[in-house]
């Protein structure tokens, strides 16, 4: 063939081996290419076998001119985008705290009760619920009366009380038998629950001592992305054969006795495999619970866990955001992935469908001891993401049908592949494909699942996505565009246009709008101001500063301009970007010139 870059690109796309000299020489794939073009070989000549005719697409044309049935290598292509990166991290409030105990504005932004006890001699003035002791009629904010030990009753009122925080902190330390504090115990500024009931300080001290944080309802949780799994090998999840048999995994999927960690077993519906990071955090929570039982309640320790392996077999509660019903589960092992592997039934029971969702797990005993509705905020929606109910058993008849449409065959029938070629509806071959739904009510909905593709080890995939390791947005954007340039199925120019129009420009314009309506805050106590005080200072004496800076508006401008030039994005998007740049110039540069170089914050 004539030496031509366009012809070479086609041959490379086809994967046809060829050599380049003065011409392009095709050795191995020469005749198939000729034949599929409707040509043939007659001696040393190439002759036309079939004339080109009308066709609906390229595949149809090749079939008609070659007389050979040709199938596309990928009949259906599915585009994908990253919804959110994977996550495996402890649940923290913003900022993170150890105890739901109010300390007001005295300490500043760190909210450290231990620091307050060391450096302050004053009481803290905070708003708490008024409770009354029915025996000695003493007014207090605590659930238990300090004087007689009776359980107090909420009066329905909230008022500002002076709490001797230093004295209370030292009493709590003495009750726990702790002498030295080499850790921060962080509380909240104020309580927003209906009864304004604080947690005991002892809980915060023990949490801080074990590196545990508290959520709004008194529980300590670990968040993970959801991944579905139906089978596993004990060796993949750090589970010994002996422990697996104790947990009920006595036979593999083929009915053989479990004697090796490399045998495949089917996971039980309410067993979960959590991130190893999650195991480390729940180990800390278990130590906090044991300390709480022994030092605060005077009971025996429950977990006695020294390593994460000691938590295998223990019960947890799984809870999704925007729900109030937790699902009981059991830890059976750990994964290096930043996710929670579990049966489709378990995820569906939590109202999750594993499309990038994340939710939390908490130790069962932690929720039973420390959760209280009295801690929940009084605002609308506060009952969401709180374990108000606990489902002990997952019933497949009550979960979303997505989990019931999972096929459980070891191999697909020929009819499935033929239907896929025709683009048939799933209902057409539903009778040929056994799904979990077909077994409901027959006693086999939990067992004897099949699978079509095995995996050597569930931990050998990508443990952490590049989005979390690339760092700066410029690096992430360049990596995305570099990948777009390499993929034939992707229009890199369109990707660049979408990045600028759907991400950078809305961010720039949105932050510019917020800049014009922003609040001010004190750099010392973090108090918010809608307008700057006439004194220019906060009541605490701290400086009042802007909450939105110029840098937050311009951070993506240079990246967007660079992409715009390199990829020649469409005119409309470029004009929008120029408009945004002009607005920034007007807001900052011209204002500086008018004010002789002074900025808005210079007038504060």
Image (cartoon, rainbow, N blue to C red):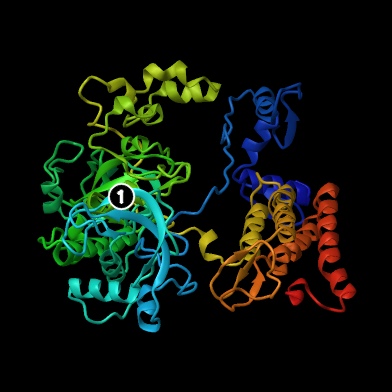
- Residue 239: % across, % down: 20, 54
Q: Nearer the viewer, residue 479 or 395?
A: 395
Quadrant of the image occupied by residue 63: top right
Regarding residue 385, the answer to whether it shows in the image is yes
Q: Nearer the viewer, residue 428 or 128?
A: 128
Q: Is residue 294 above or below residue 486?
A: below
Tell me which residue sits at (32%, 57%) in the image: 220
Regarding residue 455, the answer to whether it shows in the image is no
Image position of 464 (left or right of 144): right
Quadrant of the image occupied by residue 43: top right
Task: Tell me the element at label 1.
Answer: strand
Labels in figure, total: 1
Identify the residue under disc 1: 154
Q: Nearer the viewer, residue 518 or 530?
A: 530
Image position of 127 (left or right of 325): right
Tell me which residue sits at (35%, 65%) in the image: 98
- Residue 603: % across, % down: 76, 75
Image position of 66 (left or right of 394): right
Tell me which residue sits at (11%, 48%) in the image: 246
List the single residue furthest toward the right.
Answer: 594
Tell me which residue sits at (70%, 69%) in the image: 551
- Residue 272: % across, % down: 28, 47
Q: Nearer the viewer, residue 6 or 331?
A: 331
- Residue 41: % across, % down: 69, 33
List the single residue furthest toward the front.
Answer: 137
Answer few, some or many: residues within 10 Å of disc 1's Cα (few below 14, many 20 plus, some between 14 and 19). Answer: some
Q: Is residue 337 above or below residue 107?
A: above
Q: Quadrant of the C terminus?
A: bottom right
């Amino acid at each position: 063939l004539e030496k031509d870059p366009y012809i070479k690109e086609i041959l490379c796309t086809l994967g046809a081996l060829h050599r380049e000299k003065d011409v392009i020489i095709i050795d191995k794939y020469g005749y198939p290419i000729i034949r599929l073009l409707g040509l043939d070989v007659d001696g040393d000549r190439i002759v036309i076998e079939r004339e080109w005719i009308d066709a609906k697409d390229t595949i149809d044309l090749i079939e008609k001119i070659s007389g050979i049935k040709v199938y596309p290598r990928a009949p259906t292509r599915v585009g994908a985008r990253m919804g959110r990166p994977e996550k495996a991290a402890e649940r923290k409030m913003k900022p993170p705290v150890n105890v739901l105990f109010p300390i007001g504005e005295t300490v500043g932004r760190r909210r450290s009760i231990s620091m307050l006890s060391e450096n302050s001699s004053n009481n803290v003035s905070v708003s708490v619920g008024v409770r009354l002791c029915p025996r000695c009629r003493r007014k207090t904010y605590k659930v238990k009366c300090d004087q007689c030990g009776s359980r107090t009753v909420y009066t329905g009122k909230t008022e500002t009380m002076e709490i001797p925080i230093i004295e209370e902190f030292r009493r709590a330390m003495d009750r726990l038998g702790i002498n030295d504090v080499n850790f921060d115990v962080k509380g909240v500024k104020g309580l927003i629950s209906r009864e304004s009931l604080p947690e005991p300080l002892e809980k915060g001290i023990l949490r801080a001592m074990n590196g545990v944080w508290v959520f709004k309802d008194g529980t300590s949780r670990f968040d993970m992305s959801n991944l579905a799994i139906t089978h596993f090998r004990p060796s993949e999840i750090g589970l010994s054969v002996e422990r697996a048999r104790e947990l009920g995994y006595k036979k593999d999927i083929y009915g053989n006795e479990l004697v090796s960690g490399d045998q495949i077993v089917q996971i039980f519906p309410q067993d979960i495999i959590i991130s190893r990071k999650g195991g480390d955090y729940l180990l800390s929570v278990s130590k906090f619970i044991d300390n709480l039982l022994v030092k605060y309640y005077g009971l025996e320790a429950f977990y006695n866990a020294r390593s994460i392996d000691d938590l295998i077999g223990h019960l947890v509660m799984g809870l999704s955001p925007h729900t109030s019903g937790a699902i009981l589960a059991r830890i059976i092992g750990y994964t290096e992935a930043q996710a929670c592997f579990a049966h489709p039934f378990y995820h569906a029971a939590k109202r999750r469908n594993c499309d990038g969702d994340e939710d939390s797990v908490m130790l069962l005993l932690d929720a039973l001891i420390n959760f209280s509705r009295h801690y929940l905020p009084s605002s609308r929606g506060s009952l969401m993401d709180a374990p108000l109910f606990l489902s002990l058993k997952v019933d497949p008849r009550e979960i979303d049908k997505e989990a019931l449409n999972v096929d459980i065959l070891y191999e697909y029938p020929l009819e499935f592949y033929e239907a896929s070629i025709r683009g048939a509806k799933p209902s057409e071959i539903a009778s040929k494909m056994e799904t979990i739904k077909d077994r409901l009510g027959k006693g086999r909905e939990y067992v004897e699942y099949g699978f079509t593709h095995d995996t050597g080890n569930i931990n050998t995939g990508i443990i952490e996505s590049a989005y979390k390791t690339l760092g700066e947005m410029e690096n992430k954007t360049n990596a995305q565009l570099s990948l777009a340039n390499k993929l034939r199925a992707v229009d890199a120019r369109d990707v660049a246009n979408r990045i600028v129009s759907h991400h950078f420009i809305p961010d720039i314009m949105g932050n510019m709008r917020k800049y014009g309506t922003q609040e001010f805050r004190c750099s010392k106590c973090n108090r918010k101001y809608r307008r700057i005080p006439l004194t220019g200072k906060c009541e605490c004496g701290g400086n009042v500063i802007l909450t939105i800076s110029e840098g937050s508006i311009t951070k993506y401008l240079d990246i967007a301009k660079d992409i715009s030039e390199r990829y020649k994005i469409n005119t409309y998007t470029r004009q929008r970007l120029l408009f945004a740049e002009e607005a920034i110039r007007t807001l900052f540069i011209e204002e500086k010139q008018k004010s002789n170089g002074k900025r808005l914050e210079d007038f504060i």
